[in-house]
């Protein structure tokens, strides 16, 4: 084990709540550290987006020591600590499951085998993700050689790359994304293993691929990560439609031209509908104009387009509906003169469509509207936005009530497994059957 006293990291960026939770658990005599992405980001001068905590305390002990702590999950028991609008995951140190664990009837469920900090570090994916930081004593604990790799800016697998990728192929996508996010070089044997085992991604379930796709779209230059996915032979098993687009130079150029110019669609990267809307629209535009090699969607109503959104992007039903509606609304937005004449009631009918906001962003990014049309819709939207918000809140409430009867997994339950285990949930929202017709303000 390597301990580095006072490493060069931004101690002042550590969230005071996370600090407080670690301190309280340590006071209770439990070894407790910050772990994973936050330690990595702090060392690299990046503001962490969340702070994960690893501790020797078992969930019940955490609950006793920390207020507003909730044990979640049946298989993998994790503690979620709520503070203001934030939540912090506190996980007990775990180790890899061994074959004998599975035969011992007295052993706890396979996901809850607690271990030492060192064992916990060893089961993580990349060395730079396996670092612990004790924010109280300001010590960095490195069991996996993560610090030298941070300094050398290298992404290296913990353990044998082939075995670890076979164990969980989603690590291929995590690795590619992380290397791009941080500008790190992928260590050659890891890179070779990614290429060799790309096909294993077929075994990863759609919700996990969906999350990785969204995270790639949130990168500064997603086109580079997408291209590398293609070059390594990964795209074929990740998003086959993109593999086809990127396989032909002419189509690739056209796609990236649309993809980059349409990036302004996204003003809230936390919103998957915007991210998917951007990608889907770029694919559609390319398919409509590019030389076609296989069956490509020529309209949003095409079955191929629906399949792409559902089975390749992993979009939920309500996201598909919003994207389809947005594309469907585009031509109507050009008729702003008509709507001006017809008055506020019809304008409102159009604007209250789920896809209206996205439609306006698509139209703007695609330069479909002139300045006058754009300002007309912006003004009417802001004038009537109170009423629209009310309608939207109503619709959400109704949908919630409808869903309650069916008892779907709740958000917290989805968080109840560690990120590396959250794999076997099918797209829960795919059954959301909100009506999908567009109201174009023609009625009445
Ligand atoms: P970011 O949040 O920026 O995407 P991260 O490294 O924090 O990056 P998370 O998905 O938040 O990623 O996971 C937190 C930590 O859990 C990781 O740093 C890593 O140590 C571990 N981890 C996550 N997914 C896996 C996996 N598939 N295999 C092994 N360890 C994993
Ligand atoms: Mg994280």
Image: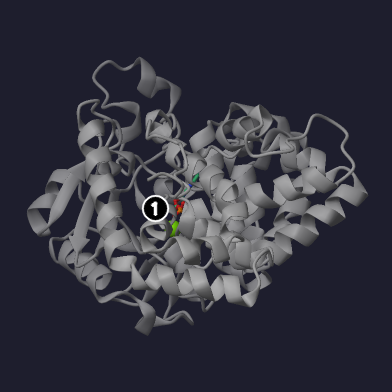
Left or right: 5 with respect to 155?
left
The residue positioned 73% from the left and 35% from the top of the image is: 297
Q: Which residue is denoted by mark 1 in the rendering?
A: 349
Q: Is 165 left or right of 48, judged from the image as shown?
A: right
The structure residue drawn at horizontal position 30% and vertical position 53%, both measured from the top left corner, is 392
Query: With respect to residue 35, does 113 lie above or below?
Result: above
Q: Secondary structure at mark 1?
A: helix
Q: Position of residue 354 (x, y in %)?
A: 42, 49
Relative to 397, residue 149 above or below:
below
Instruction: Please say whether residue 229 is visible from this viewpoint.
Output: yes
Residue 359's image quarter?
bottom right
Please determine whether, in this image, residue 152 is positioned above or below residue 409: below
Residue 62 in sight here:
no
Q: Residues within 10 Å of mark 1 (few under 14, many from 20)?
A: some
Task: Compare residues 344 and 401 and report the one nearer the observer.
Answer: 344
Residue nearer the viewer, 414 or 354: 354
Q: Hey, which quadrant is residue 98 in on the image?
A: top left
Ligand 2 position by quadrant: bottom left
Check the picture and name the quadrant holding the C terminus.
Answer: top left
Q: Which of 19 and 233 lies nearest the eye of the viewer?
A: 233
Q: Is mark 1 within 8 Å of ligand 1?
A: no
Give coordinates of residue 103: x percent, y percent: 36, 15
Q: Position of residue 333 (x, y in %)?
A: 57, 59
Q: Position of residue 143 (x, y in %)?
A: 48, 57
321 or 152: nearer the viewer: 321
């Amino acid at each position: 084990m390597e301990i580095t006293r006072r490493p060069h990291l931004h101690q002042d960026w550590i969230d005071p709540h996370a600090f407080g939770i670690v301190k309280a658990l340590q006071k209770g005599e439990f070894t407790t550290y910050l772990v994973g992405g936050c330690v990595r980001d702090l060392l690299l001068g990046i503001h962490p987006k969340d702070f994960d905590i690893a501790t020797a305390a078992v969930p019940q002990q955490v609950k006793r020591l920390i207020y507003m702590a909730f044990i979640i999950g049946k298989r993998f028991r994790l503690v979620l600590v709520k503070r203001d609008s934030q939540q912090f995951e506190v996980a007990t140190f775990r180790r890899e499951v061994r074959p004998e664990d599975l035969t011992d009837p007295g052993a706890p469920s396979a996901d809850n085998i607690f271990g030492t900090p060192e064992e916990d570090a060893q089961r993580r994916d990349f060395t730079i993700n396996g670092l612990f930081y004790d924010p109280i004593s300001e010590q960095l604990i490195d069991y996996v050689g993560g610090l030298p790799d941070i300094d050398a800016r290298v992404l290296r697998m913990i353990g044998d790359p082939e075995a670890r990728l076979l164990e969980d192929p989603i690590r291929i996508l995590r690795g590619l994304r992380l290397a791009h996010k941080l500008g790190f070089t992928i260590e050659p044997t890891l890179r070779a293993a990614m290429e060799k085992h790309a096909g294993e991604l077929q075994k990863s379930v759609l919700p996990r691929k969906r999350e990785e796709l969204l995270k790639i779209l949130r990168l500064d230059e997603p086109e580079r990560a997408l291209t590398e996915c293609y070059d390594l032979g990964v795209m074929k098993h990740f998003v086959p439609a993109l593999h086809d687009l990127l396989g032909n130079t002419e189509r690739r150029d056209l796609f990236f031209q649309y993809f980059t110019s349409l990036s302004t669609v996204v003003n809230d990267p936390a919103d998957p509908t915007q991210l998917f809307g951007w990608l889907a629209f770029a694919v559609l535009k390319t398919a409509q104009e590019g030389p076609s090699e296989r069956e490509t969607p020529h309209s949003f109503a095409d079955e191929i387009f629906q399949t792409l959104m559902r089975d390749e992007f992993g979009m939920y039903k309500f996201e598909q509906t919003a994207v389809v509606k947005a594309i469907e609304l585009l031509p109507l937005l050009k008729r702003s003169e008509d709507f001006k004449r017809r008055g506020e009631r019809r304008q409102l009918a159009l604007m209250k469509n789920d896809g209206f906001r996205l439609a306006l962003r698509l139209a703007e990014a695609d330069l479909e509207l002139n300045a006058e049309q754009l300002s007309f819709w912006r003004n009417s939207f802001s004038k009537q936005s109170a009423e629209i918000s009310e309608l939207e809140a109503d619709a959400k409430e109704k949908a919630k009530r409808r869903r309650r009867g069916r008892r779907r997994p709740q958000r917290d339950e989805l968080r109840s497994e560690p990120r590396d285990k959250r794999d076997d949930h099918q797209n829960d929202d795919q059954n959301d059957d909100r009506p999908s017709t567009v109201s174009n303000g023609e009625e009445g």
